[in-house]
Image (tube, grey):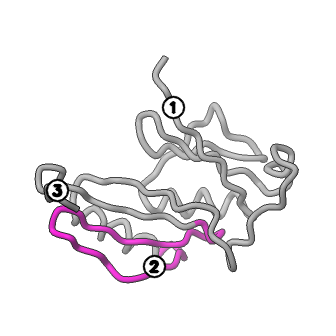
Amino acid sequence: MKTKIFLNLAVKDLNKSITFFTQLGFSFDSKFTNEKGTCLIIGENIFAMLLVEEFFKTFTPKEICNTTTSTEMIAAISVESKEKVDEIMTAVVKAGGAAHGETKDYGWMYQRNFFDLDGHHWEIFFMDESQIPDKM
């Protein structure tokens, strides 16, 4: 079995989160979807479980991060081109997310950041590994 990554994120409104990520071009695994959560498919072996807050709380004794004042993590997703980065960011804003910070273009890497409806921090980037400088 190949290793898979499942990020678990607390969401306030599951249906709004599903609509948001659908508008960005993502899909969901129906095997892991019910009224408590859904499985956002990010890549072949990368997923984010979007879990309603009450259900999320059953997995940890800690408080859920207040994403308006704290960052729990930055989920970075690579895409196939700079144009795809910009396309996703246009969809983010149209779907109600918030662009964050300036676009960064290092020549070999192009990246943009956003906050989803629940304030989770995401980065979308394109990287041309053949152009990575020898010394960073």
* 133 in the magenta segment: no
Q: Identify the amino acid type marked 1.
A: Lys
Label 3 neighbourhood size at 10 Å, few (<14), some (14-19), many (20+)? Answer: few
Q: Identify the amino acid type marked 3.
A: Ile
User: Which of the two residues, 16 or 123, is positioned nearer the viewer here?
Assistant: 123
Residue at x-position 72% and y-position 57%: 10
Which residue in the protein does label 2 denote? 99
Residue at x-position 60% and y-position 42%: 39
Which residue in the protein does label 3 denote? 132
Magenta region = 94-120
The number of numbered badges drawn on the structure is: 3
Which residue in the protein does label 1 denote? 4
User: Which of the two residues, 62 or 17, is positioned nearer the viewer here?
Assistant: 62
Looking at the rendering, which quadrant does residue 113 occupy?
bottom left
Looking at the rendering, which quadrant does residue 30 occupy?
top right
User: Which of the two residues, 16 or 113, is positioned nearer the viewer here?
Assistant: 113
Is tag 3's residue or tag 2's residue first in the polypeptide sequence? 2
Q: Identify the amino acid type marked 2.
A: Ala
Give the image location of residue 119, x and y in percent.
62, 71
Give the image location of residue 25, x and y in percent.
42, 55
Is tag 1's residue or tag 2's residue first in the polypeptide sequence? 1
Give the image location of residue 115, x and y in percent.
54, 72
Is tag 1's residue or tag 3's residue first in the polypeptide sequence? 1
